[in-house]
Each structure stands twice: as C-alpha cells, then as structure tokens.
Image: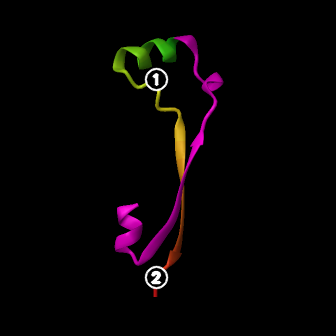
Amino acid sequence: MKLLEQCGWKITHLIDCPLSSERFTGNMVSHMQKNRTLGITRRTLIIGKLDQ
C-alpha cells in the first residue's frame, strides 16, 4: 500500500477477502499451528485512484 502511495496513487478502499481453509492439507494445518499462522487466511483488495 505504501508503495502505491509513493507512486502517486490515493488508496480509497481496503477490503479484506476471506479465503477458504479447505485448500490446506492436514500437514499444512499442523505446520501453521506450530508457527501460529493458521488465522491468516485472507487477502486484502486495495482500491485506489491515481492522484493527480
């Protein structure tokens, strides 16, 4: 987001899009639980306009 702002874009919206946990195998879930990263299953959609 900061890179976009440095390039002259104005961020107008940030939307968190949840992802399905079905794409993870049992082995991946176990590894993520150990690293405490299991709750991070989303992508952020950034909407902006070129600030002129």
Looking at the rendered structure, the number of numbered marks drawn on it comes to 2
Q: Is residue 8 left or right of residue 21?
A: left
Estimate the x, y position of residue 2 in percent, counting from the top left: 35, 63
The magenta segment: 1-26
Q: Nearer the viewer, residue 29 or 51?
A: 51
For mark 2, does the 10 Å Cα neighbourhood hold few (<14), some (14 to 19), or many (20 or more) residues? few
- Compared to residue 49, the image places residue 19 above or below, namely above
- Quarter of the image for the N terminus: give it: bottom left
Q: Nearer the viewer, residue 41 or 14?
A: 14
Q: Is residue 20 left or right of residue 36?
A: right
Q: Earlier in the sequence, mark 1 or mark 2?
A: 1
What's under tag 2, amino acid-wise?
Asp
Q: Residue furthest bottom?
A: 52
Which residue: 47% across, 27% down?
39
Which residue: 36% across, 65% down?
3
- Compared to residue 2, the image places residue 22 above or below, namely above
Residue beneath label 2, please?
A: 51
Q: Is residue 6 magenta?
A: yes
Residue 37, by quadrant, is: top left
- Dots 1 and 2: beta carbons under 8 Å? no
Secondary structure, mark 2, is: loop
- By what rule are the colours in the image chosen? rainbow
Q: Which mark is residue 38?
A: 1
Estimate the x, y position of residue 14 in percent, counting from the top left: 51, 56
Q: Is residue 52 magenta?
A: no
- Compared to residue 6, the image places residue 29 above or below, namely above
Estimate the x, y position of residue 41 in percent, counting from the top left: 52, 33
Estimate the x, y position of residue 22 in percent, counting from the top left: 65, 23
What's under tag 1, amino acid-wise?
Leu
Q: CA distance from mark 1 to mark 2?
A: 37 Å
Q: Is residue 5 left or right of residue 48?
A: left
Residue 8, by quadrant, is: bottom left
